[in-house]
Image: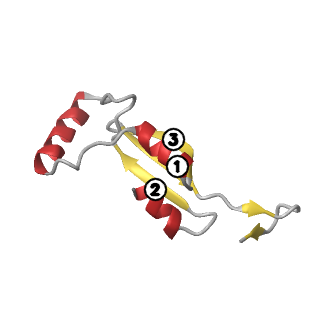
Amino acid sequence: MLIASADAALAKGSILHLYGPFREHGAHTAPSNATFDDRLRARKASWGIHNLEAAVTAGRAHQPHLAERVAMPANNLSLIFHKACRYAATGSEALP
């Protein structure tokens, strides 16, 4: 939902930066992330740590697309999504 909303809100050439813990292949990457996920879901069932693959799939269905994944401290990730723009034949001007 966030990525679909970003698709509508961001101008071409913009980025969306997501930071935090993600599950990978349905599994937590650290016991501390599993504990954090349990605490979030205890407060509200729709909260919690999301699957990395779901974010990437959402980016493929919309724009922006995942451009970079950076490992961060404390078992977190920075995901950099880029809403691509088309370039003129010269490569110097973005087209609408």
Q: Earlier in the sequence, mark 2 or mark 1?
A: 2
67 versus 17 height, above or below: above
Q: In which quarter of the view is residue 96 placed?
A: bottom right
Q: Is residue 91 left or right of residue 66?
A: right
- Which mark is nearer the camera, 1 or 3? 1
**Residue 18's x, y, as percent?**
42, 52
Around disc 2, counting alpha carbons within 10 Å, would you say few (fewer than 14), some (14 to 19), or many (20 or more)?
many
**Residue 61's x, y, as percent?**
54, 49
Q: Quadrant of the N terminus?
A: bottom left
33 versus 20 height, above or below: above
Q: Earlier in the sequence, mark 3 or mark 2?
A: 2
**Residue 22's x, y, as percent?**
35, 39
Residue at the image point whose x is 39% and y is 28% from the top: 25
Identify residue for label 1.
Answer: 59
Q: Secondary structure at mark 2?
A: helix
Indicate the amino acid at tag 2: Ile
Q: In which quarter of the view is residue 75 placed?
A: top left
Identify residue for label 2.
Answer: 3
Q: Are marks 2 and 1 in contact (CB under 8 Å)?
A: yes
Q: Are marks 1 and 3 in contact (CB under 8 Å)?
A: no
Mark 3–mark 2 distance (CA, rounded to whole Å): 16 Å
Q: Is residue 11 left or right of residue 54?
A: right
Identify residue for label 3.
Answer: 69
Residue at the image point whose x is 34% and y is 34% from the top: 23
